[in-house]
Image: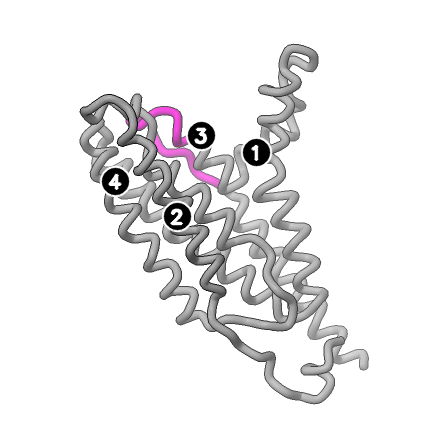
Amino acid sequence: MDSARQTGEPVPTAPIPRARLACAWILACAPLLLGWVADSGVDRFAGISLVALCGIPWLFVMGMPRTIGVRTTFRQELGGAALLLAPLAAAAGLDQAQGAPNSRTLVLVTGVLAVALVLADSARRAAATPLGARVHALAFAVLVAGPPLLLYALEAGGGPFLGRAPAAVAWLARASPLGALFGNVRDVVSPPQASIGVAVVLVLVASSAAWRRREAEDT
């Protein structure tokens, strides 16, 4: 157990690091900026979903494990998520210009904001103790970031030798929030793909909280 819990002191809080916010915001804006170096007209984006593409780096950076023993407040997480509104609004307008249905754009924007807030809040809660941080880091690697990267490595990098990736890896990639966004990038008019990965991460983070309470009761 950490010293704060042993002495009964509250876990210290701190604002979200500016470097993390700046990195997430710049990466979220990058797809919008890079599109303007192509030929003029909305066709420069080749029918990809800018909403999904902008959401991928934000989910990864803001949802990744954080410094152990320091927590931000939920209000600060809301303030951080508000920075994503401008890039998403611009991306939604470009998706609409490419012919994306209104319902798809609304569902995707709402889903990106909700998942971004859930992952960020899970990361901040888990950072309170070393045990919670370890469980969250494992869950993030196995259920959020790892499967899509592994699927890409196997099918794009090892495709000529391995063929298709194992079914379990493909399923985990589709269940991952990042994997679902990757799936939504390809076609701006296709129905949005859902994800169950966030729910699993929340279950694991809640389990780590229960382990912490049990650990406190045993001491």
Callout 2: SS: helix
Which residue position is annotated with label 4? 92
> Marks 1 and 4: in contact by CB < 8 Å?
no
What type is the residue that disc 1 sits on? Pro
Q: Residues within 10 Å of mark 1 (few under 14, many from 20)?
A: many
Position of 80 relative to 156 (above/below): below
* In the displayed structure image, the side of residue 84 where residue 133 appears, left or right: right
> Marks 1 and 3: in contact by CB < 8 Å?
no
| Closer to the eye: label 2 or 3 | 2
What numbered label is drawn on residue 26? 2
Q: Which residues are magenta?
A: 184-195
Separation of disc 4 and disc 1 at Cα? 24 Å
Which residue position is annotated with label 1? 148
Specify which label sits upstream in the sequence, 2 or 1: 2
What type is the residue that disc 3 sits on? Gly
Q: Residues within 10 Å of mark 2 (few under 14, many from 20)?
A: some
Separation of disc 2 and disc 3 at Cα? 22 Å
Q: Residue at x 40, y 71 (%)?
A: 75
Q: Residue at x 26, y 43 (%)?
A: 106
> Marks 2 and 4: in contact by CB < 8 Å?
no
The x, y position of residue 159, in whole percent, is: 63, 15
The quarter holding residue 105 reads top left
Q: Residue furthest right?
A: 219
